[in-house]
Amino acid sequence: MLQQRDPAWAREFEAILQAYERAGGRPDVLQTPRVASAVISGNQVLAVNLVEGVSIEAQEMESGVRARIVVAPDTVVEYPVHLCFGMIPSEGLQEIISEFEIGERAEVGFLAHCTFPNAVDLKHVMDARIRVGSGATMRYSEAHYHGSTGGIEVLPTTHAQVDEGGRLESEFSLVHGRVGRLDIQFEVDVDAGGTVELTAKAYGSAEDEINVNEVVRLNGEGARGLTKTRAAVRDRAISKVYTTAEGNAPGAVGHMDCTEIVRGKAVARNVPVVVVRDDRARVTHEAAIGSVSKKELETLMARGLDEDDAVDIIIRGMLA
Amino acid sequence: MQNDVLLQVEDVWLQRPGAEVLRGVDLTVGRGEVHALLGLNGSGKTSLALTLMGATGYRPERGRILFEGQDITNLSVTERARLGLTLAWQEPARFEGLPTADYLALGMKKPTRERIEEALAAVALSPPAYLSRTVNSALSGGERKRIELAAVYAMQPRLAVLDEPDSGVDVLCIGDIMVLIRRMASEGTSVLLITHRDEMAEVADKASLICGGAVVNTGTPAEVREYFAQRCRPHGDRLGSQPWGVEAGGTYQRVVAEGVCSE
């Protein structure tokens, strides 16, 4: 592990902070004592800051970092925990193996920025396990920035458990820079009275490939689940969205909502799967795939924008 | 073309699926002029607005449109907008994730916060309450209409085509819209005001009456109202699309000859 007074640490820290800013993060927050945070570059843990009730244990591995993040029961964390993951080199592998344990009745938000500004041949693997305790709330937002070459694979896999009355909101966003290949795998089990909301947003171009595969199992009475996917693809990019919602208990309510915009020779696909195992559960889905609305497009063109810029504004608005 | 003419529409015909919606429209709008285009539902007002803007599916098969003396009949929407022509849609589009301030700034050559706030205030919307609101379906129809007008005002075009700016807004707001239209004219924007309320036409310098896809009368707003009152009468066999007719005579002969309205 690099030491904080080491010049090599300072160079690496400075570089990752610059990349973090390009991904939409605020570097000053990572150095604010009252905000819990972790900064990870490649397989190096450059900085960790803790606040009361939040523990972050991070271990460096050969090609990444293993982290365990625990929020103590009944802790309400005032500011979101800021996480910065990234790699400055153009090639390599970064594996983040993480475990989130949110104690009963705790409330916490996470703001993660993943930045790979120079990626040419790079793989970012995330394997997360999440447990949201009874009555607890976890909000997790992850934004990516990948540079302009598309030479990157992002492979996040998550297994989550939401206990009775718990709430998990997860948002993944990859709308700046090239996507490369994105393959989101997310499975979540929800107990009685629990709620889960999964949002994924991605904007692919050139030969980018977007795969979203989400499975929501509403196992407890009154469990609620929502998946919301917004994807836009242009050029020859491909978007494939597979979502499954299972209503397995009385009063379980699930909904899947997918909107995809297609331009050029791109291809978008959405396959919602509805499974209901209890006659008092209800699961619905809606999907819209197509080009941008002609009326929206011509409204912006009537303000003087050319067609490409107008399309970009409409898509970025949808992905905002 | 005279120098005081900004827009000249010459014998424009437009076919839409299942109907010929414009049948030889002739219309002239002068520089700095507010020109009201009056007509009942289905008379061709919105089709003409979309034709002027060059919207998809609204390219005329005959006739031409001159703007500042330049033939713009085959120009794209963007090209027309960059020449200074824009349109406030009758039912404005909604945009997910686009804040009102950004929406207004899109059409401005040099966007400033002051001008954006001024434009919102001009349509009786409080800038602090609306600047960051998204132009999406959370807005009421009336709010969205006012934002559309504010966007056109902020843009400072040479010609603003306002398609029924009074529809869907509360009656109390109509006075604000009329004031805004005069303000636009005083700041150098000509306005083609499309409406079916003849009281709205009071703000106009000139007016034209459109019926069955053709302009049948042009004059002062009072003259056009008089023409409508004296020469138009209920038209039982076309209820729902053109519930009135005009006695034969003058420019209307041709429309009658096309069988759009009967005597």
Image: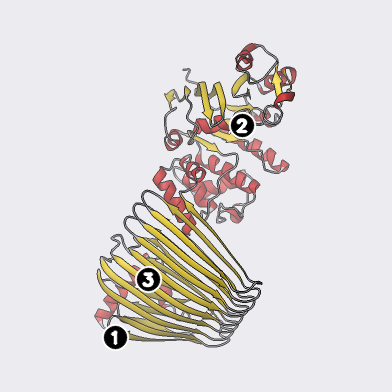
Chain for disc number 3: A
Which residue is painted at 45% across and 53% down in the image? A261
Q: Quadrant of residue A40?
A: bottom left
Q: Residues within 10 Å of mark 1 (few under 14, many from 20)?
A: few
Residue B198, numbered label: none
Residue B188 visible in the picture = no
Q: Nearer the viewer, residue B131 or A215?
A: A215
Q: Can you identify the residue that label 2 sits on?
A: B194
**At label 1, which amino acid type do we have?**
Gln
Chain at numbered mark 2 = B
Residue identified by numbered label 1: A3
Q: How is the image coloured?
A: secondary structure
Kind of element beneath mark 3? strand
Q: Is residue A44 above or below residue A231?
A: below
Q: Residue at x 54, y 43 (%)?
A: B151
Mark 3 neighbour density, 10 Å: few (under 14) some (14–19) many (20 or more): many
Label annotation for residue A114: 3
Label 1 SS: loop
* Residue A123: % across, % down: 30, 71
Question: As displayed, is residue A65 above or below residue B170?
Answer: below
Query: Which residue is located at x 45 percent, y 73 percent?
Result: A186
